[in-house]
Image: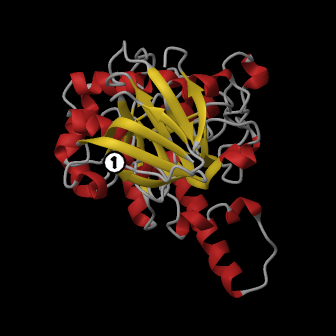
């Protein structure tokens, strides 16, 4: 067992803190067998209990941070083309590709994530294809990917706009226009739906290409839509509604221009990366203000670094910049914890500190959104995976 004492707990849980998810509880957290056992102002254990105790000295204790969209380990930082497995750029429709077959947990970014208090990440293919493949949510510390999986598949990557256009127009093949992107995705969804309906009622040979769509049509996972521009956002929503599918709006760079409409639609947004240059036509309106405008309109918002587009360890700083530009402090904390967990479909396991959830916890000596704040302790599944030498 592990007991964290004298902690300033920002639980992000209505159960623990009443109606205000950002309230601070001064107390203790008891961890056993990788799970949070108890959260209370005071926890007394029998003297005979086999328990490690850590006095947190009233530092901030939070759920481990969650990166809701990135390419960590699938686009390795130090290995160039040899370590880049993010996009299968020879066919525009590849739903059967699985991120877990390409994520290298030895990528240096995993260590950076742990030192930043990031305990899990939603990782998957890039946006060069109309359909890129299946994302996975994994824990950020360990060697064998199979042991780190929190949810697989967690989403099906689809992309609209500039990236698939640029990639395939250069090959003199479709898609060369936004019309082709939407048309090819519709055709794929129709074919997949027909295959799945037939497979459920007849003896049909397994087709891995179309089987990959099953959790999407069963609404167990969403389409994870790469969308920057207003027109692409609306096209993604149009197709999701045509096929009655769940969807997340990833990047959503012009979402602030249509925030009330997106709030009415009810789909969540994973906003970012904003720590980057406006190096493409479709990101000309990228701004840190987007997250706040969307959240204030009623859209559920998480923040992404899109690592390695911006570095994974900059996640809390990205959130801080969004707070500086209008996102409320409470929504900032939510964006990298409970909101990210809900958007990734893992809120039953992580995203808040409460009994029964995974003991994924980060301890900071201040607000993690501030640049001088240090991570003091990172705990994943009840194990201390990082401890600052100053703590």
Q: Residue furthest bottom?
A: 201
Q: Residue furthest right?
A: 205
Q: Which residue lies furthest to the front in this view?
A: 47
Residue 34, above or below 195: above
Residue drawn at the location 75% of the way across and 36% of the way down: 143
Q: Mark 1 points at which residue?
A: 42
Q: How many labels does the image show?
A: 1
Residue drawn at the location 54% of the way across and 23% of the way down: 115
Residue 383, above or below 318: below
Q: 252 or 38: nearer the eye?
A: 38
Q: Quadrant of residue 275?
A: top left
Can residue 82 be seen?
A: yes
Crowd tier of the residue under label 1, counting other residues whose Cα lies within 10 Å: few below 14, some 14–19, many 20 or above? few
Residue drawn at the location 74% of the way across and 86% of the way down: 202
**Is 47 on the left-hand or right-hand side of 328?**
right
The type of colouring in the image is: secondary structure
Q: 73 or 273: nearer the eye?
A: 73
Q: 353 or 254: nearer the eye?
A: 353
Residue drawn at the location 65% of the way across and 35% of the way down: 141
Question: Residue 140 in the image: x percent, y percent?
Answer: 61, 36
**Is 332 on the left-hand or right-hand side of 350?**
left
Can residue 184 be seen?
A: no
**Is 170 on the left-hand or right-hand side of 323?**
right
Residue 116, above or below 243: above
Find numbered disc 1 in the image and state the secondary structure of the residue it sits on.
loop
Question: Residue 382 in the image: x percent, y percent?
Answer: 57, 44
Question: Residue 96 in the image: x percent, y percent?
Answer: 71, 54
**Is 114 on the left-hand or right-hand side of 278?**
right
Question: Residue 52 in the image: x percent, y percent?
Answer: 56, 39
């Amino acid at each position: 067992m592990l007991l964290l004492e004298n902690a300033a707990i920002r639980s992000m849980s209505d159960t623990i803190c009443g109606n205000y998810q950002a309230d601070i509880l001064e107390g203790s957290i008891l961890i056993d067998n990788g799970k949070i056992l108890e959260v209370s102002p005071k926890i007394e254990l029998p003297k005979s209990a086999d328990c490690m105790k850590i006095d947190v000295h009233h530092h901030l204790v939070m759920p481990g941070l969650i990166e809701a969209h990135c390419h960590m380990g699938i686009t390795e930082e130090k290995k160039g083309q040899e370590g880049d497995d993010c996009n299968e750029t020879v066919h525009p429709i590849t739903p059967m590709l699985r991120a877990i077959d390409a994520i290298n947990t030895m990528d240096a970014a995993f260590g950076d994530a742990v030192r930043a208090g990031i305990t899990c990440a939603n990782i998957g293919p890039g946006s060069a294809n109309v359909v890129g493949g299946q994302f996975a949510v994994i824990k950020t510390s360990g060697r064998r990917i199979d042991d780190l999986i929190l949810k697989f598949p967690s989403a099906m990557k689809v992309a609209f706009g500039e990236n698939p256009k640029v990639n395939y127009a250069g090959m003199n093949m479709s898609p060369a226009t936004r019309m082709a992107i939407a048309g090819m995705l519709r055709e794929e969804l129709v074919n997949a739906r027909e295959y799945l309906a037939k497979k459920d009622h007849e003896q049909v040979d397994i087709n891995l290409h179309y089987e990959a769509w099953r959790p999407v049509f069963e609404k167990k996972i969403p389409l994870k839509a790469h969308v920057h521009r207003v027109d692409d956002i609306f096209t993604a929503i149009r197709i999701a509604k045509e096929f009655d599918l769940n969807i997340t709006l990833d990047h959503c760079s012009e979402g602030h221009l249509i925030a009330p409409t997106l709030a009415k639609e009810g789909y969540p947004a994973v906003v970012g990366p904003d720590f980057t240059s406006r190096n493409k036509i479709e990101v000309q309106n990228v701004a840190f203000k987007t997250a706040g405008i969307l959240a204030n309109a009623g859209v559920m918002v998480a923040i992404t670094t899109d690592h390695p587009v911006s570095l994974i360890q900059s996640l809390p700083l990205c959130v801080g910049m969004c707070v500086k530009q209008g996102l409320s402090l409470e929504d900032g904390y939510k964006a990298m914890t409970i909101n990210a967990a809900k958007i990734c479909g893992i809120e039953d396991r992580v995203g808040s500190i409460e009994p029964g959830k995974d003991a994924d916890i980060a301890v900071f000596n201040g607000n993690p959104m501030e640049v001088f704040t240090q991570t003091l302790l990172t705990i994943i599944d009840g194990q201390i995976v990082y401890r600052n030498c100053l703590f």
